[in-house]
Image (cartoon, rainbow, N blue to C red):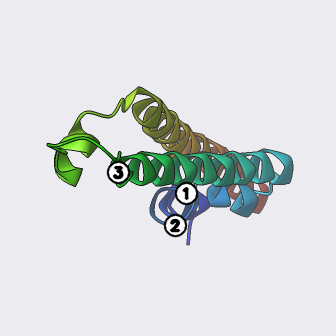
């Protein structure tokens, strides 16, 4: 299978950075994999903190809002930033893998001739 198709397919559908590893760009691929892992961990921690805060109960208040009301009242700006960073990283990974795969395919075709 051509690398121009296989690389972005792996980056887009499996894990960002895997296409770079297939294209033999190990440093870039490992960096992207680490960034994805860090973004994933940060997102899980932020979600945990948001949910944990929503389930906190304050003693002495006559009307406590529901858990859903507490979740809606939370500040989601950091979560949106993390998700946007992941989307940008994913798009970059797919495009970079496709471009590098296309270059490698051209080099292989030229070497065959």
Give the residue drawn at x 35%, y 45%. Answer: 58
Asked whether 3 or 55 is in front, the reply is: 55
Q: CA distance from mark 1 to mark 2?
A: 6 Å
Tell me the residue that label 2 is attached to.
Answer: 14
Among the 4 quarters of the image, the one containing residue 2: bottom right
Asked whether 71 or 78 is in front, the reply is: 71
Tell me the residue that label 3 is attached to.
Answer: 57
Give the vertical position of 24 relative to 39 (above or below). below
Give the residue drawn at x 14%, y 43%. Answer: 63
Q: CA distance from mark 1 to mark 3?
A: 43 Å
Can residue 98 be seen in this snapshot? yes
Residue 49 picture location, percent across and down:
49, 48
Asked whether 64 or 111 is in front, the reply is: 64
Callouts 1 and 2 close, C-beta under 8 Å: yes
Q: CA distance from mark 3 to mark 2?
A: 40 Å
Can residue 113 be seen in this snapshot? no
Residue 64 picture location, percent across and down:
19, 45
Mark on residue 32?
none
Residue 19 picture location, percent across and down:
63, 58
Among the 4 quarters of the image, the one containing residue 84: top left
Image quarter where the C terminus lies is: bottom right
Q: Residues within 10 Å of mark 3 (few under 14, many from 20)?
A: few
Tell me the residue that label 1 is attached to.
Answer: 11
SS label for mark 3: loop
Residue 24 picture location, percent across and down:
80, 57
Q: Residues within 10 Å of mark 2 (few under 14, many from 20)?
A: few
The residue at the far right in this view is 27
Give the vertical position of 10 relative to 71 (above or below). below
Image quarter where the N terminus lies is: bottom right
Asked whether 68 or 6 is in front, the reply is: 68
């Amino acid at each position: 299978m051509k690398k121009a198709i296989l690389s972005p397919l792996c980056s887009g559908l499996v894990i960002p950075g895997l296409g770079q590893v297939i294209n033999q760009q190990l440093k870039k691929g490992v960096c992207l994999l680490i960034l994805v892992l860090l973004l994933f961990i940060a997102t899980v921690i932020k979600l945990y903190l948001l949910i944990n805060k929503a389930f906190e109960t304050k003693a002495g208040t006559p009307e406590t809002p529901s858990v859903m009301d507490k979740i809606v009242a939370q500040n989601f700006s950091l979560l949106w930033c993390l998700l946007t960073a992941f989307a940008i990283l994913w798009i970059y990974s797919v495009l970079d893998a496709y471009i590098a795969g296309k270059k490698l395919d051209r080099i292989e075709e030229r070497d065959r001739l």
